[in-house]
Image: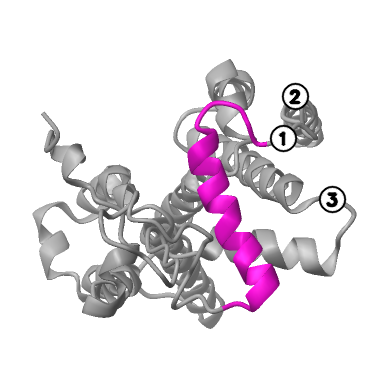
């Protein structure tokens, strides 16, 4: 056990330091436009307060939605990432707002490494788990995106966490001691929180819940549709996203929603 923790710790330390590459450079690298958009929402929180129901940024043009945006609304993912970035900058300081954005992403990527290790080790063995953690930590593609000012890495961390806690919850027996019931409830709540946050951060997280669906099927078979606890889990995970989408779809916010027809080849 001690050896395991030492190896995992060394991987995390190495992963942290390689992600500090050009840590203090301006936001002018690949996807800089998207990183700047994300960071500018956080800057607005710092300057004007944390109105998470109406995230805004300094772009008042029609370039994003093809509609004039005089309020500067920016309705994309729920601004959990932006709140973390702005809060750390305001309350700890020491680094610039952009550097805090990178640190939030770096920390999220390290959490992803830990959860991936736990999941893979649980279903295979220690060696495979360590190898999985190592490659997630040091694949160059992932190193780059694990230091960008984007919420995607936070989504990955939350989704892996939700999957891990879901697996723990669903494998516990239905009935047992009081201690077991408390443990089961704790795993359930953590699974809901992590999964709901992942979907709020990036809706396409729904596509990556297939392992959760498989775990439910492996545990219950086709009887999974009769498990009321799974329906409660689904409703609690998806409801925050549905409420957010309903709120941002109000007519007064339409100019703050980026056009997305190009996702379906709308621009040919």
Residue 239 screen position, x and y as percent: 29, 74
Nearer to us of marks 2 and 1 is 1
Instruction: Tell me if residue 22 comes above or below residue 217 in the rendering.
Output: above
Q: Secondary structure at mark 1?
A: loop
Is 164 above or below relative to 136? below
Element on which disc 3 rests: loop
173 vs 216, left or right, is: right
Distance from the alpha carbon under mark 3 to that under mark 2:
18 Å
Residue designated by label 3: 95
Residue located at (75% from left, 24% from top): 18
Q: Is residue 45 visible?
A: yes
Residue drawn 56% across and 31% down? 145
Task: Measure the alpha-carbon separation of dots 3 and 1.
Answer: 13 Å
Q: Main secondary structure of the magenta part?
A: helix
Nearest the viewer among 42 and 141 is 42
Which of the two discs, 3 and 1, labels the residue nearer the N terminus?
1
| Along the viewing direction, whichever of 114 and 138 lies nearer the viewer | 138
In the picture, the disc for residue 26 is 1
Mark 2–mark 1 Cα distance, whole angstroms, equals 18 Å
Query: What residue sits right under mark 2 in the picture?
Result: 18
Residue occupying image coordinates x 34% and y 49%: 63
Instruction: Give the magenta range.
Output: 27-50
């Amino acid at each position: 056990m001690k050896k395991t923790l030492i190896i995992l710790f060394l991987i995390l330390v190495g992963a942290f330091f390689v992600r500090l590459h050009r840590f203090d450079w301006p936001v002018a690298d690949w996807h800089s436009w998207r990183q700047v958009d994300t960071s500018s929402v956080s800057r607005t929180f710092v300057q004007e307060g944390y109105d998470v129901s109406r995230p805004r940024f300094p772009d008042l043009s029609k370039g994003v939605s093809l509609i004039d945006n005089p309020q500067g609304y920016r309705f994309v993912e729920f601004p959990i990432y932006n709140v973390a970035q702005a809060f750390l900058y305001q309350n700890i300081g020491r680094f610039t707002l952009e550097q805090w954005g990178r640190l939030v992403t770096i920390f999220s990527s390290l959490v992803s490494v830990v959860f991936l290790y736990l999941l893979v080790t649980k279903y295979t063995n220690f060696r495979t788990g360590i190898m999985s953690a190592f490659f997630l930590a040091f694949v160059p593609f992932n190193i780059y995106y694990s230091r960008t000012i984007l919420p995607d890495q936070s989504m990955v961390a939350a989704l892996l966490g939700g999957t891990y806690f879901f697996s723990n919850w669903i494998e516990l027996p239905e009935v047992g001691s009081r201690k077991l019931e408390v443990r089961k409830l704790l795993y359930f709540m953590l699974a809901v929180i992590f999964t709901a946050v992942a979907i709020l951060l990036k809706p396409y997280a729904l596509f990556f819940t297939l392992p959760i669906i498989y775990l439910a099927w492996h545990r219950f078979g086709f009887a999974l549709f009769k498990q009321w606890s799974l329906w409660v889990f689904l409703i609690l995970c998806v409801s925050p996203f549905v409420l957010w989408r309903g709120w941002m779809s109000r007519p007064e916010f339409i100019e703050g929603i980026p056009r997305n027809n190009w996702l379906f080849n709308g621009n040919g």
